[in-house]
Image (cartoon, rainbow, N blue to C red):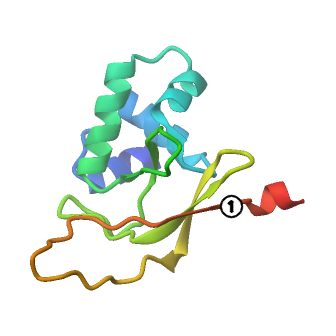
C-alpha cells in the first residue's frame, strides 16, 4: 500500500515525505470529509502546522478539496482523479448531516452551472445540502 501511496503523490508532483504518506493513507480510509482538528485527534501525535501544510500542498496539487459546509469547520476530502495543479474539477454536491454532523461527497451529483451577470467573475462553486444522511435515517 505504501508504494501505491507514493505513486499517487508522485503523480501529483508531490514529494512523498513520511508525513505526506501518513496523511494520504489516513484520507484514503475516510468515508466522509474530515476537519483538520478531527484529523489531528485521530492521527495522534502530529504537529498541527505540518498537518495543515500537508493538506495545503495536497489541495494546491489537486489531491484534496476543501469543503465549507456551514459547520464552522473547514473539511477536507480526496479529489477525483481529474483534479490537478491547474484546478479542481470535482464540482460535485456535498451533503451535511444535521444529526451526525458528517459531510459526505456526492461525486455523481454535480453542482449546476449558474449564469452570473457580466460584472461578476466566479472563482469557485460549491453546493452543500443539509439534511439527514442515510445512516441516521436507519
Relative image position of residue 8 (x, y in whole percent): 37, 53
Residue at point 50% right, 27% down?
37
Numbered disc 1: secondary structure: strand
Which residue is identified by label 1?
A: 131
Residue 14 image point, x, y percent:
25, 44
Viewport quadrant of the C terminus: bottom right
Residue at 9% in and 76% down? 119
Quick one: label 1, few (<14), some, or many (20+) residues within 10 Å? few
Residue at 32% of width from left, 82% of height from top?
Answer: 114
User: Which residue is nearer to you in this view: 109 or 8?
Assistant: 109
Q: Residue at x 28, y 40 (%)?
A: 56
Compared with residue 90, is residue 76 higher up or lower down, i.e. above or below? Answer: above
- For the question of whether residue 1 can be seen, the reply is no
**Does the image show residue 110?**
yes
- Taking the view exactly as shown, the residue that stands out farthest to the left is 119
Q: Where residue 40 sits in the image (x, y, percent)?
A: 50, 24
Q: In which quadrant of the rendered view does residue 100 lie? A: top right
Q: Is residue 120 left or right of residue 49?
A: left
Residue 134 position (above or below residue 50): below
> In terms of depth relative to the viewer, which is nearer, 113 or 61?
113
Amino acid at each position: 500500500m505504501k508504494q501505491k501511496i507514493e505513486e499517487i503523490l508522485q503523480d501529483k508532483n508531490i514529494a512523498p515525505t513520511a508525513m505526506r504518506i501518513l496523511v494520504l493513507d489516513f484520507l484514503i480510509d475516510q468515508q466522509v470529509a474530515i476537519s483538520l482538528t478531527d484529523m489531528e485527534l485521530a492521527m495522534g501525535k502530529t504537529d498541527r502546522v505540518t498537518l495543515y501544510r500537508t493538506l495545503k500542498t495536497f489541495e494546491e496539487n489537486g489531491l484534496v478539496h476543501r469543503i465549507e459546509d456551514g459547520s464552522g469547520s473547514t473539511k477536507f476530502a480526496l479529489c477525483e482523479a481529474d483534479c490537478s495543479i491547474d484546478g479542481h474539477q470535482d464540482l460535485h454536491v456535498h451533503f451535511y448531516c444535521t444529526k451526525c454532523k458528517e459531510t459526505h461527497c456526492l461525486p455523481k451529483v454535480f453542482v449546476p452551472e449558474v449564469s452570473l451577470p457580466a460584472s461578476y467573475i466566479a472563482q469557485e462553486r460549491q453546493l452543500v445540502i443539509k439534511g439527514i444522511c442515510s445512516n441516521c435515517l436507519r
